[in-house]
Amino acid sequence: MTHTRILLVDDNAVGRYALSRLLRREGFDVIEAATGQEALRLAATAPQPDLIILDVKLPDLSGFTVCQALKQQPATAHLPVLHLSAVYVQEADKVQGLESGADAYLTGPVDPPVLLATLRALLRVRQAEAALREVNATLEQRVAERTAALQREVAERQQMQAALFQREKLAAMGSLLASVAHELNNPLSIILLHTDLLQADAGPGPLAEYAAEITQAATRCERLVRQFLTLARQHAPERAVVDLNALLTEIMELLAPSLRIDTITVDLRLTVELPQLWADPHQLQQVVVNLVTNAQQALREVAAPRHLPLSTGIDPAQTRVTLEVIDTGLGMAPEVQARIFEPFFTTKPPGVGTGLGLPLCRGIVEDHGGTLACTSQVGQGTTFRVELPVGAVPATPPVAPVEAAGLSPRPSVILIVDDEPSITKALTQLLRRDGHTVDTAANGRLALMQLQERAYDLILCDLRMPELDGPGLYRALESRYPELRQRFIFLTGDTLNPETQTLGLQHGVPHLVKPYTATALRRVIRQVLHAV
């Protein structure tokens, strides 16, 4: 029992000496106390004893009182206590001793073997209890760790479900937005075509000015529709020449109404002669919209005036273009700023943020070989800085010049295939004014019947129509009138339709996206007729 420490409490110095000598001879470490108060102090002092031998009769406190005090204190409650009485006592005293919390009770004269056996038995029980406490503590720790892990898993799953719901909602909103935008294309085309006719008829004067204002308003609507479609579209990664200043100008025009509602003044600080980027314009637009929207939400938390500067620049080596979006909101604490690019981390309430916007933005920027960094200070706002490399823009082959005068060397016979009467009427008026002969058909089936009656130089065809749509008519020409496939133009507002992309990319069929102006229509007709 080496290194087992025993506190021996007895006011009888002779008896205490004899018992202490016995215990030390058996290999125990012994500390001694002559009073109850001294026993309480030594029991709570490190290193604590492993067991206490406590005389019942002490000069200041009874052994029962000392034992109760030990068992009531968390620091000493686990210590085994052996009550020891030098004389025979009544059974009631033994009961009182055990009820006070003692683990055993011996009365004198006590045989040394009995005393030592009792001590060793109490120590074994204490060791077993200590081992059990350690096992319990380990189990409790494992249960706590597993519970925490399950809670994290549940929280992450809830975040993923919320993010999935948000993505599905955004996808549905995108589809709805695209549908609404497409429905606006036809009336906008009619407005633009008729204002072109009105301007031609009016000549100089007030009517021409009114027509110009209508054209300007309709063109702005057309630009907004195109931007809506861009936001709703799911693009595969692509690369094109991007003018970052022009991209910012278009995006801020789109977001301007919402920013005005929040009384946010936008300050565009665009560096002139900014190098062009070879990038995905739709993905860069997604980055800018996300950063500006975050800045707008931050500015809502502060009182007016609200100021939102956006600036572009170029590094001295002319190798990297920069974009900074700055808000003067409340800023972020360092612990929040350190996590803003973690997926699913958000400080916004449920339904407002998914925690995916900034990670996606950083992924897009890094895929372009750039960086997205954030600096923020509580009370002073936040700055997001995008850096993009100025890559080599591939050279494009020169476009063959087209004669500017006239739509064709001779008047052309044109077939318009469209189920929208207003579009058909406006196109007919415009083309007949340009000297062409025009027939119309409301769908592809009727167009095939028209082709049996008359030869046509050109077909202008809508994409979606009842009975036989535009792609169906185009395919039908392959076996019946293959030469007309080279003189075929799609007029469509449905640029999201995969069939539009397939016909344009695989077959090289020209198409004009609604809404379009008379100038754009004349240009594409001229190009097609010039090429055959």
Image: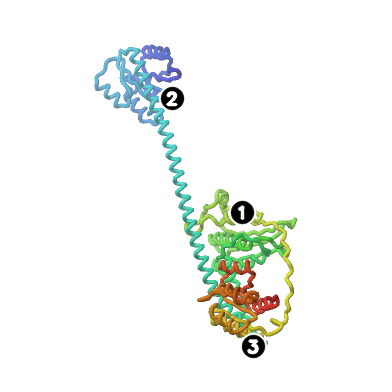
Question: Quarter of the image containing the N terminus?
Answer: top left
Q: Secondary structure at mark 2?
A: loop
Q: Is residue 217 visible?
A: no
Q: Secondary structure at mark 1?
A: strand
Q: Is residue 489 visible?
A: yes
Question: Quarter of the image containing the C terminus?
Answer: bottom right
Q: Is residue 335 above or below residue 487?
A: above
Nearer to us in this view, 222 or 135 = 222
Earlier-in-chain disc, 1 versus 3: 3
Q: Nearer the viewer, mark 1 or mark 2?
A: 1
Nearer to us in this view, 405 or 150 = 405
Label 1, label 2: how many angstroms apart (C-alpha)? 55 Å
Which residue is under mark 2?
48
Image location of residue 48, percent across then percent down: 43, 24
Which residue is under mark 3?
201
Image location of residue 291, percent across then percent down: 59, 59
Q: Nearer the viewer, mark 2 or mark 3?
A: 3
Nearer to us in this view, 421 or 80 = 421
Name the amino acid, label 2: Gln
Which residue is under mark 1?
374
Q: Nearer the viewer, mark 1 or mark 3?
A: 3
Nearer to us in this view, 518 or 21 = 518
349 left or right of 59?
right
Label 2, label 3: how many angstroms apart (C-alpha)? 109 Å
Earlier-in-chain disc, 1 versus 2: 2
Q: Secondary structure at mark 3?
A: helix
